[in-house]
Amino acid sequence: MDFEHCSCSGKSLNRLLQPALLATLSEKPSHGYALLQRVCELEFFAGAPPDASGLYKALKEMELEGLVFSSWDLSASGPARRLYALSSSGEACGRQWVKTLETYREQIDGLLDLLTKDKPKASTRS
């Protein structure tokens, strides 16, 4: 069986796009394209980077939730671009993600222990 596109490959963890965006925006305000590039550099998304439309959809949802805000950047040559920045609610959400991810890590460690624990081999009958 080819596990490349199976959920067991870990390539379908798109729910973690939000904390990745929060972490990236905590570094500095950024344009959408720069955010996409930065998120794609994260080891977590290696081999399965989010697509641009999914990233912009996540940013729009985060803006509606009050986690980020955006403004038009007219300073660069070329068309106006949106500049995204973290709000105080986004900063608080990022701190909550730290707690959540630490809990996930503990739970994953427990699951890994269970999956990798030496189990007696089933006897084969002749």
Image (cartoon, rainbow, N blue to C red):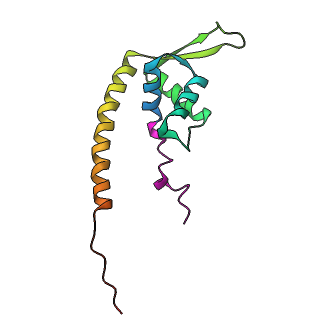
Magenta span contains residue 21? no
Q: Position of residue 17 (x, y in %)?
A: 48, 35
User: What residue appears at the point 50 percent right and 16 percent down from the top-left corner?
Assistant: 29
- Residue 7 drawn at (x, y percent): 48, 53
Which residue is pictured at 47% across the width and 39% down the height?
44
Is residue 24 left or right of 105 when viewed as pictured? right
Q: Residue furthest bottom?
A: 126
Question: Which residue appears farthest toward the top when viewing the image?
Answer: 75
Residue 81 place in picture, x, y as percent: 63, 16
Figure check: 61 above or below 11: above
- In this view, the residue in front, 112 or 100, is 112
> Vertically, is 115 above or below 28?
below
**Residue 21 percent location from the top left of the image:** 47, 28
Please identify the quadrant where the C terminus is shown. bottom left
Q: Let me know if residue 4 is in the magenta part.
A: yes
Q: Image point 45% across, 31% down: which residue? A: 20
Q: Which residues are magenta?
A: 1-16
The single residue placed furthest to the right in the displayed view is 78
Taken as a whole, is the magenta stretch helix, strand or loop? loop
Q: Is residue 50 above or below residue 86?
A: below
Number of residue marks:
0
At x 29% / y 33%, what residue is drawn? 99
Which quadrant of the figure has residue 100?
top left
Q: Between residues 86 and 115, which one lies in front from this camera angle? A: 115
Q: Quadrant of the N terminus?
A: bottom right
